[in-house]
Image: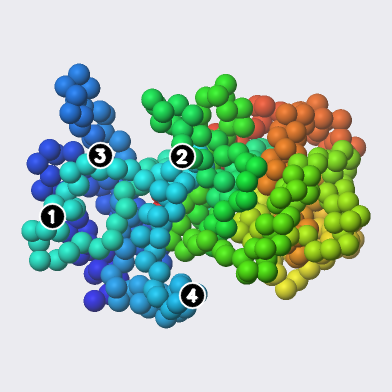
Amino acid sequence: MTETADVETAKKLLQAYFQSDGETRFTFKGLNGKGENALTWKISYMRIHRDPTTYYELPRAIVLKTAKKDSTRREVLRLNPARLTAGGDVINPIENERKWLKHLEWAEHFAKLVPIPRDPLRRATRSHAVNFPDYLYLEWVPYGTLWNFILRARRQGYSALPNRLLWRFFMCLIRMVIGMAWPPLGPEDWENQVPVIERVRGIRPNGLVHQDMHTNNIMFGYFEDPAQNPEHDWIPTMKLIDFGEAKDVQETNEERNYLWRFYRGTERSRAIYGTDMSMWADWTRFDGDDWFNAAQRSRPIPIDRGVAKNVFDIGLIMLNLALLRKPIGQSRSEMRDIPGADIPTTAVELVTPDDSTGDYPNPDLDPTLRNVIARCLAVDPRRRPGPAALVDGVSKAIAERDVNFYNARARKGDPLDTESDDVIKQVVQDLILNASDSGLG
C-alpha cells in the first residue's frame, strides 16, 4: 500500500473514531503535515468541564500527531540507522517525544501536550479490530515555521532583518537551550499553572539534546503580555517542536568525574557558564578569552556535551536568519577563524568578507551579533558561549540597543530608522501575522 493510501486509510479511521465521541467534542479538520516518522492532523476540540458553572469552553484547534505505519517507519530506520538506541533497539519517536515533552511541560518555549479526558481513540481501539498507532495530542501553534518565515521574507523582497528583531529571536532560542539544560520544576502560579520562562540554575545541567533542531522545527506561537515578559514585546513566543529523536547525552566516567570536581568550585563554574560578563565589556568584539583565567587555560575546560550541541544548533538557526537563507556549502568540515579571535568557526560564510568590496554578507548586521553567532558555531565546543553568558549578553543588547544606537552607527549614505519600532512592527505583520501557513506541522 502506498503512503497516500495509508494516509487516506488513517483519515477515514480517525473520522470514525471522533464521530464515535458521544459528547461531540471533536471536529476532524484533516491532514495538517507529514514528517518522516509521523503525520499531523488538525482537530477542533471543545473541552467540557464537570463544573456546571463553567460547563463548556469555546472550541479550540489542537493537533493530533500519529505514527506512520510500521512498514514506513522501518524504511526510515533503514535509511537512518542513527535512530536506534545504543543497545540496538528501535526508538519509538512518538513515545520518545511524549517522554521529553512531559519533562519540559512547564518550560515556555516548547510545544505542549494536550490532555484529553475520555479519549475517543482509546475507547475505539478496545472495540475495533484495527488498533490505532501511537499518537499525541499537542497544542496548536498558530503562525507557522521559522523556515516559512524566511521564505516569506525572501518572496517579499527583504534582504535582511532588523538587528533588534534578530536579538529577540536569538533570546527565544537561548531560552530553549536553557530549558533543555534546566527544565522548570513547576509553575510560579500553581492556581493558573502557566508555563514559566526558562532560567539558568546553579546546578549541573541535563544532557538533553534535541538532535533535530532546525528552522522547520521552530514555530511561532501566541503573543504574550509584554508587561509580563518584555522579551516578547514585538514577537510571539517561539516554540521548539518534534522531540522524536531527542536523547540524554551521557558523559564518559572520566568526563563525569572531572565535571564533578569542576562544579564543586562556584568561581570555576562561573567561568564555564560565562556569568563573568567581562567579555561583553567591549561591544565591538567577542573573543571570550576573559572567561578563563590563566590557570584554567593551562588545562582542559570541561564541557557539557548536550549544552554545547544545542548552542551549536541555535547558532546555525541564527545563521539562517542573518542570511535569510541556508548558508551555501555550510559544513562542519569547513572552518575559518573569527575575525579578531583565534577561534575557528564553521560560520564560514558569515565571517568571510567579499574579495572586491570587503563587505561581509548582510553588511548591516550588528558586528557583535555576527561574532556571537560565529562563536556559537565554534569548532571546539569549549569555545562556544555558555547559556548564562548568552542570556545576560543578549538581554543587555535588547535593553540598550535601540533605534538611536543603530542610527548613530549607520554607515555614511545609509538610510536611518531602519531599526525603528514601526519598521519592526511592519516586519512582524508581513511575515508572521499575515502568514497563510500555520499550525504544528
Q: Secondary structure at mark 3?
A: strand
Q: What residue type is disc 3 on?
A: Tyr
> Which label is found at residue 221?
none
Q: What residue type is disc 2 on?
A: Trp
Q: Are marks 2 and 4 in contact (CB under 8 Å)?
A: no
Relative placement, left or right, of 145 versus 316 is left
Compute the Cα span from label 3 to label 4.
39 Å
- 91 or 266: nearer the viewer: 266
Q: What residue type is disc 4 on?
A: Ala
Counting residues from the N terminus, which is met first, the one under dot 3 or under dot 1? Answer: 3
Label tally: 4
What residue is drawn where x is 87% and y is 59%?
297
| Residue 350 seen in the current view | no
> Which label is found at residue 86?
4
- Circle 1 sits on which residue? 124
Compute the Cα span from label 3 to label 1.
17 Å
